Structure formats: structure tokens, C-alpha cells
Amino acid sequence: MNNSQLAPQRLKIEDAGGVWGYAWCMFRVWRGKYHMDIERRVIVRKDFKGWRDCFDAECRSLKTLWGYDSVEFLSICQA
């Protein structure tokens, strides 16, 4: 993801206080041979620092807590 390609005024970001916000993101999840795309709210820094780490953590969470076999980050939702 290239930060220069993101237009902050177009991202669906909710305020979470301070430097934190919630970005709505799309993930593709698999169980066996079946997959679906889901939208998830991910906590991120408003200054774009460490966003990849936030997406990776959400992928791990979906695998361990929800039991998906595989999870892939697809995109950040824009307004």
C-alpha cells in the first residue's frame, strides 16, 4: 500500500480518540474451499504509521478467534 495513493478525506475513518481511528477494510476469508469477502473495522493511527501491522493483526485475529483457515487483507474502504 502506498500512502501517497490514499486520500485521507475519502477514507471511511471514525475517530477513536487521540491519534487513533477506525478504518473500514475488506478482507477475504476462507473455510476449506469456500471464501467470502467481509468488511471489518480496524483500529489504526490517523497519521498512517504502522497500518500494515494493524491489518496483519486483524488477519491473525480472524484466523484464531473466528476459525477461518486463511485470511487476506484486500483494501481500505473509501467513502
Image: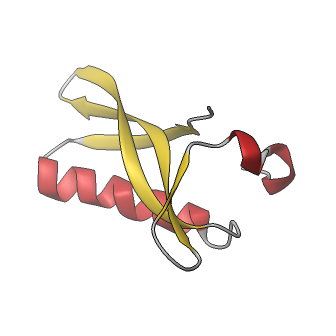
Measuring 64% from the left and 67% from the top, which residue is drawn there? Answer: 46
Residue 21: where, in percent of width, then height? Answer: 51, 64
Colour pattern: secondary structure
Hey, which residue is sitting farthest right in the picture?
4
Residue 71 in the image: above or below residue 37 = below
Residue 60: where, in percent of width, then height? Answer: 31, 59
Measuring 57% from the left and 42% from the top, which residue is drawn there? Answer: 12
Residue 70: where, in percent of width, then height? Answer: 30, 42
Q: How many marks?
A: 0
Residue 8: where, in percent of width, then height? Answer: 74, 50
**Would you identify the image quadrant in which residue 64 lies?**
bottom left
Measuring 23% from the left and 51% from the top, which residue is drawn there? Answer: 63
For the C terminus, the quadrant is top right
Horizontal side, residue 40 vs residue 16: left or right: left
Residue 16 in the image: above or below residue 9 = below
Residue 55 in the image: above or below residue 37 = below
Q: Nearer the viewer, residue 37 or 45?
A: 45
Hey, which residue is sitting farthest bottom in the picture?
18
Residue 78 in the image: above or below residue 40 = above
Horizontal side, residue 42 vs residue 11: left or right: left
Q: Nearer the viewer, residue 74 or 15?
A: 15
**Would you identify the image quadrant in which residue 29 lies?**
top left
Measuring 57% from the left and 37% from the top, which residue is drawn there? Answer: 75
Q: Nearer the viewer, residue 28 or 15?
A: 15
